[in-house]
Image: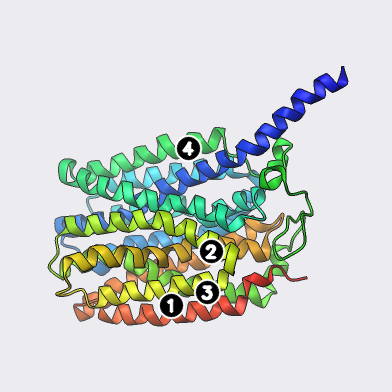
Amino acid sequence: MNASVADPASARTARLNRTYPWVVLGISFMTVAAAFGCRAAFALFFVAVIEEFHWSRGLAAGALTLGSVAWTVSAPAWGHMLDRLGPRFVFPAGAGLMAAGFAVSAMTQTVWHYYLGMGLLVGLGFAALPMTSQATVISNWFVRKRGMAMGLAASGIGVGIFLVVPAAEWLIGALGWRNAYLMLAGVMLTAVVPLNLFLQRRRPQDMGLLPDFGATAAEGSGGPRRAREGGVTLAAALRNYRFWALCGGFVFGAIPVHMVLVHQVAAMVDAGLSREFGAWVLGLTGFFTTFTMIGMGTLSDRIGSERAYTIGSLALVGGILMILYLDGMPEVLVVFLYPPLFAVGFGSRQGLYPTIAADIFHGEHFGSIIGFLAFSIGMGAGIGPWLAGYLHDISGSYASSCWIGIVLCVLSLVCIWVVAPSKGADA
């Protein structure tokens, strides 16, 4: 009789081990798709808002800078809450704040309205949702194929950009940018909140399951990647030179990515291309990003994160050089070359940062640690758009921003090689 009771329970556990990791990945995929797609649409609203209010580019981009400051300052707190309260509280709360920010942005009459909505509220909410936050969940469910799993979840960023950006451009043209913002608020409330509130789980052990579809026990196998029950504390991480080198790599790497992400459409308009063309190229970039996120994660499993990051950095430099020499460039070259180059560079950042952090610091305190690391990413995401806008206002072009971005790509790459994530955690 005991066997007859145990057999159905064992069968159910085996079934959940096979299926629920995909549920976790799917929810993370949907979450980052909505969050990044809506945030990337800022590049279109940026142009529309400037046209209506005649603000300078530095002033308009300052809203996103404020948002990144809010992201930067709140990221450690969100990470601590992830450790204490879990994703079923943190992720719906972040999505709700982003929705509130879009709603406030839709009612903008003066610059402080826009800074409150698109800046403070969206920034605070977004800080709870990016891949650094998703990594606290995914790294618990996947150990041996962590890079692949991170890449699959991060591919939602590309899908979100590919779908949301062209949709936002259509909505802006058909309904106006204010109503388009309200549509984005609806996306966050109807897609992100319920999925995470009812279905997301922090770790497989909470459901009586094990990582890697049931294949990895608590201690796992040897090597740089293994399941760890304890892990280093935040205080210990702060005393580790690899933590600070990683912070440098993240901030130097985030500045050029977000510089280009926000200003690429405006740069194309400056070069004589239409806003609609820029929106289409940005959406195409999202399409390629879908695949490069998976590719970067899988590549890191095979050749190591340092080498994968090197490939991504070279591609990002190539994309920045195309922005630098955009004036007079044939449209066909922009369409066929720029999106894959920037997508590989973008994927090497958003896809690999959480994987690199998890390889070194995964454990019970990983949420708090990656929250502080996200501080660096948020800092870079804030500096990049503002710096490019400011330099454009005083020089009339994006040339100086592009060269600064290339130098920072090199510095970021040096930091990642110093960190040496393929060595795994310190003994």
Q: Earlier in the sequence, mark 4 or mark 1?
A: 4
Q: Please name the residue that numbered disc 3 is placed on.
A: 249
Q: Name the image colouring.
A: rainbow
The residue wearing badge 4 is 193
Residue 314 is drawn in which quadrant?
bottom left
* Disc 3: CA contacts within 10 A as few (<14), some (14-19) or many (>=20): many
Q: Is residue 321 left or right of residue 312?
A: left
Image quarter where the N terminus lies is top right
Horizontal arrangement in the rendering, residue 45 relative to residue 207 (left or right):
left
Vertical arrangement, residue 26 with respect to residue 411, above or below: above
Distance Cα–Cα, label 4 vs label 1: 35 Å
User: Which of disc 2 and disc 3 is earlier in sequence?
Assistant: 3
At mark 4, the secondary structure is: helix
Question: In the image, residue 217 lies at what x, y percent?
Answer: 77, 48
Q: Which residue in the protein does label 2 denote?
A: 299
Q: Amino acid at mark 4?
A: Val
Q: Amino acid at mark 1?
A: Cys
Percent from the top left, x then y, of residue 73? Answer: 51, 62
- Pointers 3 and 2 in contact (CB under 8 A)? no
Which residue sits furthest right?
A: 1
